[in-house]
Amino acid sequence: TLDYMNIGLVSAVQPVYAGGQVRTGYKLASLGKTINEKSLELSKEEVLVKTEQYYWTLVSLQAKRKTLSSYEKLLNNLQKDVQVTFNAGLIEKSDLLKVKMKISEVEASKLKLENGIEMLKMALCQHIGISYNEGITLQDTTFVIKNPESLYVTPEDALPNRKEYQLMNNAVDAEVLQKRLSKGEYLPQLAIGVQGRYLDIADQQNTYGIAFATLSIPISDWWGGKHKIQEHNIKIEIAKNNLDENSELLKLQMSQSFCELTESFKLISVANAQLELATEHVKAVTDNFRAGVVSTSDLLEAQAAYQEAEDNLTDAQSTYQIKETIYNQVAARNEN
């Protein structure tokens, strides 16, 4: 029959109104892209905060290494003095042994500290994605302590800048758009089109075209659609409730972080005061030791207290830098 009848048909249809589904779908896709971009930025912020934590902890350990080296030199000098005094028969051998034991403890502490520094360097390199090298050195090793009041941002002002808050708002918008998309499935749909037709019946050719319009009205699924819309309404309410609840948690997190920052700032003052007292104490004990008034044990105790006071100050300063980094993140100050 193909020798006697050939038919060709071409048609094109353009939706005029599809219940708003096309426009809503485009908005939903754009919103999805925005959510992905914000999620990526949030991940970057978390990586940067973790990097700074590694960094300032490493700075703290390197500062402690200097303190320990100074303490070791002090003990070595003390050992020489005590050795001379022991050789002169002015002190007992136990005093000399106490100094040697303290030097052994320092050597063990140095070994642990060096291992800790190298392990932390490895962790930092792995975290930022560079190859580990033993010769890696830190450029910025100075603690910069600022008054927390100069950093403070009210939680209400900071909240809109938090990526987490923005993502929760986007979640509400997404549920609203999903509802619109579902409603569009149950609305009338209008389209226009053209059609071209070619007929060849027993060599009698005939070509013609028509324009047409279609109107589709979904009727049978209206009842199911009603329940589906109600389901979307519930999802929207859930997203809004999550937004309200988590917004309060975010503001609480900011307030807590600022309290911790303020506390760490005050602890630096306490550590400074303790170091001043320890400095005066070790100086007085050293003078009395040379005058033969106090024992070697007293001097070793005073020196150990001085080293501990220096380490406490280093820890307080390092902790402050880390708390400042965390507060800058939770208060969205990195955006400024």
Image (spheres, rainbow, N blue to C red):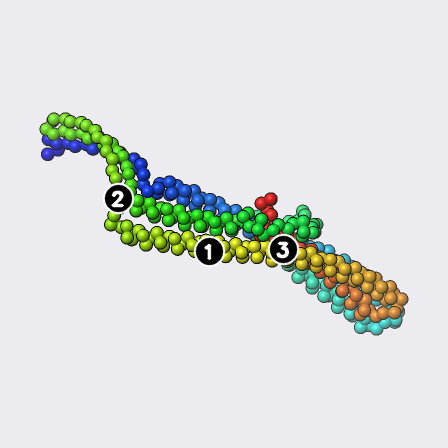
Residue type marked 2:
Ile
Residue identified by numbered label 2:
217
Counting residues from the start of the chain, the first of labels 3 and 2 encountered is 2
In space, the residues marked 3 and 2 are separated at their CA atoms by: 59 Å
> Is residue 131 found left or right of 198 in the rendered image?
right
CA–CA distance in space, label 1 to label 2: 35 Å
Which tag is nearer the camera, tag 3 or tag 2?
2
- SS of the residue under disc 2: loop
Q: Would residue 55 be visible to someone looking at this image?
A: no
Please tell me whether mark 3 sits on a helix, a strand or a loop: helix
User: Which of the two residues, 160 or 135, is positioned nearer the viewer here?
Assistant: 160
Q: Which residue is mark 3?
A: 258
For marks 1 and 2 on the same chain, the one whose residue lies earlier in the sequence: 2
Circle 2 Cα neighbour tier, 10 Å, few/some/many (<14 / 14–19 / ≥20): few
Left or right, 73 with respect to 174, comes to: right
Distance Cα–Cα, label 3 vs label 1: 26 Å
Kindly identify the residue that appears in the image at 76 percent across and 61 percent down: 274
Q: Residues within 10 Å of mark 1 (few under 14, many from 20)?
A: few
Amino acid on which disc 1 is placed: Asn
Which of pointers 3 and 1 lies earlier in the amino acid sequence? 1
Circle 3/circle 1 CB separation < 8 Å? no
| Amino acid of disc 3 | Phe
Residue tagged 1: 241
Q: Residue at x 14, y 29 (%)?
A: 200
